[in-house]
Image: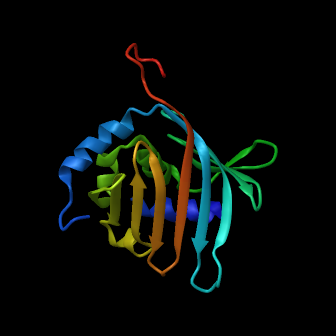
Amino acid sequence: MIARLLLLALLAFAGGAAADDELLRQLAPRMAHIQSLTGSFEQARHISVLAAPLLSSGEFSYRRGEGIQWRTTHPVENEIRITPGQGVAVVDGGGNARPLPASEAIAGIFLGLFAGDLDSLGEYFTLTGQRQDSGWSLRLTPRHPQLAAHLDTILIDGDEHIERVEIREANGDRSELRFQVTASTAPSANGDGE
């Protein structure tokens, strides 16, 4: 289930009345300073033909330059690795990674989100930002018809880190991911992680 979600979300990764350009300028460096994140996630996948959402949860870790490890622990265990240059891979029980075809671009876009690379995301999406009572919100709308055929919009809420992502698909299905960051590092004054 998470592999399908990531594939759809990553394929697609290609407020007030107007975008808050100042907010976008402030967010990019704030997110880009993060060297690593570790935490947990909860996902609710709402499929139009099902009465109740499909629920899953697990752990994630992100290291700048290395990628993302996404491990679902409930209801079934699986692991996905997203790495620069290698794309998205499903990891089996023995630790062997099986790359998904044509996933390098998908990985680049997903890593761009975690890295706060809004310029890279702007190649695929129209980004609008809005300040919230406690944090910020971004709306990513696909620029290209091929992406829009699969994805309506992506909504991202956060404060210090991304806290919630809602992926609205063109067919009416949607997924909501909530993140709880348990550890984060940023460069210290001497360039090392804190």
Is 193 placed left or right of 134 in the picture? right
In the image as oriented, which residue stretches furthest toward the front? 133
What is the image's colouring?
rainbow
In the image as oriented, which residue stretches furthest toward the right? 94
In the rendered image, the quadrant that contains the N terminus is: bottom right
Which residue: 33% across, 66% down? 141
What is the x, y in percent for residue 31?
38, 40
What is the x, y in percent for residue 91?
71, 48
Which residue: 29% across, 47% down? 119
Is 11 placed left or right of 6 in the picture? left
154 w.r.t. 39: above or below? below
How many numbered circles does the render carry?
0
19 w.r.t. 23: above or below? below
What is the x, y in percent for residue 158?
41, 51
37 w.r.t. 102: above or below? above
The quarter holding residue 46 reads: bottom right
Which residue: 47% across, 65% down? 166
In the image as oriented, which residue stretches furthest toward the top? 190
Which residue: 40% across, 63% down? 155
Given residues 181 and 82, the one toward you in this image is 181
What is the x, y in percent for residue 94?
81, 43
Given residues 29 and 89, the one toward you in this image is 29
